[in-house]
Amino acid sequence: MNASPLHGRHIVITRPVGQAGKLTGLIKTAGGEAVLFPLIEIAPLADYQAFEQNIQGLARFDWAIFISSNAVQNGMPYVSRLSLPSTLKFAAIGPSTAAELATFGIEKTLIPAGRFDSESLLALPDMIDVKDKQVMIFRGVGGREVLADTLKSRGAEVQFAECYRRINPQENLRPLTALDAQDALDAIVITSSEAMRHLLEMASNQAWLKTVKICVNHARIAEAPSQLGLDVHTASAPGDDAMLACLIKALS
């Protein structure tokens, strides 16, 4: 492989501030230039009183599921103050979230293997046999319903514990269109359906986007831009190394 396979390439990363460091480093090492343009900003709740009341009953639950590192960072400081039984089990959407839980002393966390999403977690035997189990899902305000809906259909009682907000910090896409006008926009990395929605909603005219490679980390995120005829590439696996490989292949 060329030592600088991304030489001269400009790649926009749309992740929240603080979550783009590793990928930025990988892109620079490969000779590219990373441009930070977050389309998601993680914000705490304005008031945690309702959340704290919500989790008071966690001791009677069978499972606490955390759908992201953000859920751990914003929820566990409150959960860790509670007196919880050893029977409470923890599950996470992937290893990064599990590692975050470990910083709060949660050493045994159920996670899927291979793909890290709701569907993969739901395929695990522990998540199939949930009849009459009580499950609390820690997440941001809103979010996908597939996890809760499927667990309910399997006989579980599900309650949400929403502990942060996701907002779009950008007013418009002028910084990106300016780069495109200078032929200095080669690819955009998008790793959440919400960020993709923000991009497409703000890009009322998608013609300029058709000249840009859009690299995503899940087939679900690729659906909307693919339907619009955009040039979408999906990483073969989760993680920043796989995303780098996706960028190199797309831009070669």
Image (cartoon, helix red, strand yellow):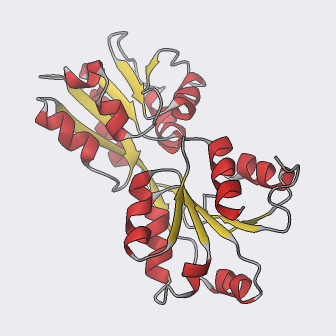
Report whether 54 appears left or right of 25: left
**Residue depicted at 87% across the width and 54% down the height:** 4
Instruction: Between residue 244 and residue 154, name the one nearer to us.
Output: 244
Q: Residue 6 occupies which quadrant of the picture? A: bottom right
| Residue 57 pos. (x, y %) | 26, 28
Q: Note whether residue 171 is visible.
A: no
The number of numbered discs placed on residues in the rendered structure image is 0
**Residue depicted at 46% across the width and 38% down the height:** 75
| Residue 96 pos. (x, y %) | 57, 33
Report whether 101 appears left or right of 141: right
**Residue depicted at 26% across the width and 23% down the height:** 61
| Residue 20 pos. (x, y %) | 69, 53
Instruction: Between residue 53 and residue 149, name the one nearer to us.
Output: 149
Q: Note whether residue 186 is visible.
A: yes
Extreme-top residue of the structure = 86
Instruction: Between residue 60 and residue 167, name the one nearer to us.
Output: 167
**Residue depicted at 69% across the width and 82% down the height:** 175
Q: Residue 116 occupies which quadrant of the picture? A: top left
| Residue 250 pos. (x, y %) | 64, 61
Report whether 79 appears left or right of 32: left
Q: Residue 227 occupies which quadrant of the picture? A: bottom left
Which image quarter holds the C terminus?
bottom right
Instruction: Between residue 68 and residue 87, name the one nearer to us.
Output: 68
Say above or below: 74 vs 113: below
